[in-house]
Amino acid sequence: MGFMNAGFASYSPFLKLQPTAASFHLFPNSSDFSLYSVHMATSGYVFDIRHYSVHDGPGIRTSVFMKGCPLRCDWCHNPESQLMLPIEVIKEKKIGDKLLQLPETIGKLMLPADVQEEILKSRLFFEESKGGVTFTGGEPLMQPDFLSDCLNLAHRSNIHIALDTCGFAQPQTFNRIIAQTDLVLFDLKHTDSLMHKKFTGAALEPILINLQSEVLAQKPLFVRIPLIPGFNMTLETYHEMAKVLKRLKNLKQVDLLPYHRIASHKYTRLGMQNKMAEINEPKEKEVNEAVSFFMHEGFKTTVGG
Ligand code: SF4
């Protein structure tokens, strides 16, 4: 497709972001991150569309999982989402007493109209439950033009739109897309720049800039905090997060997302290193401590979204 050549390898939008000498150090410079954003007029890569989701916003929702992410979180539950292009894996399937190894492609190119057609299948459930569609990933902002077209179609059909984002995007892109949404689910993983960079591969500062965006301030906001042992599960980190959260007047709730090992098999299947292979899931007591902390600070707090 023509769009794949239109800047796929060379577009580096962050070089246009706040073009001051002091700001350049904030932005990623690895070649992988040069894939940060793709101009797509009419089509984009999606790796799953799930109906009847209840953890990605209010009511019953359809979750559209888009491919591509500028981060590389050690704990990522969807490592198959990270690369923009579809990937080939071998899937084992038992038929009778035979174990077959079958090729499977993760991700496919879709038109916004195809995505909308799939979303509309659950429309009755949206109306009954006050649900809608959630665009997630990966990072949906990696494909802003495709995403924008999808949001337009959903909006025209009066479907409630949530965007689940890591917040790492060029502010112009971020604000343009946020203006098209009804609810934003924004990940806050840490408040310490070095820790953030070490465990996600990306700078924290662009994320904090977007979290304080005036366009975002006009939208209902859920902040989602992954609870990752050895990374952010300390009272000190919670205190720093609470300081950031208290500045957000549009914040409706805090969703705590405890790390789980459910994705371990994906790393094996994809031939990727699982940096969390030896890390246990947080204990119930530790999760409760985090819940108590954020509730005590005055935030409506949920576990799992
Ligand atoms: S931001 Fe989400 S999808 Fe991207 S690497 Fe991190 S956990 Fe995975």
Image (cartoon, grey):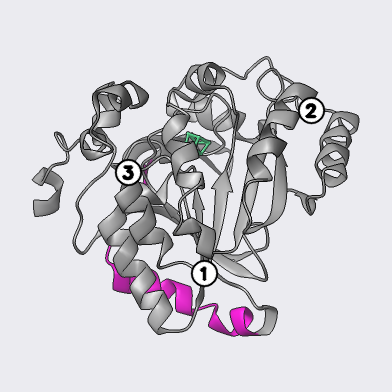
Q: Residue at x 31, y 41 (%)?
A: 84
Q: Which residues are magenta?
A: 104-127
Where residue 170 is drawn, which disc sits there?
3
Q: CA distance from mark 1 to mark 2?
A: 32 Å
Kind of residue sitting beneath label 3: Gln
Q: Is residue 11 above or below residue 233?
A: below
The tag earlier along the polypeptide, 1 or 2, is 1
Where residue 182 is drawn, which disc sits there?
1
State the image coordinates of residue 178 (x, y, percent, origin top left).
43, 60
Residue extending farthest to the right is 285
**Circle 1 SS class:** loop
Q: Is residue 79 above or below residue 153?
A: above
Q: CA distance from mark 3 to mark 2?
A: 33 Å
Q: Is residue 287 above or below residue 57?
A: above
**Circle 3 SS class:** loop
Crowd tier of the residue under label 3, counting other residues whose Cα lies within 10 Å: few below 14, some 14–19, many 20 or above = many
Kind of residue sitting beneath label 2: Pro
Viewer-closest of 213 and 301: 213
Q: CA distance from mark 3 to mark 1?
A: 20 Å
State left or right for residue 140 relative to residue 276: left
Kind of residue sitting beneath label 1: Asp
**Circle 2 SS class:** loop
Write down the residue under mark 2: 282
State left or right for residue 287 relative to residue 114: right
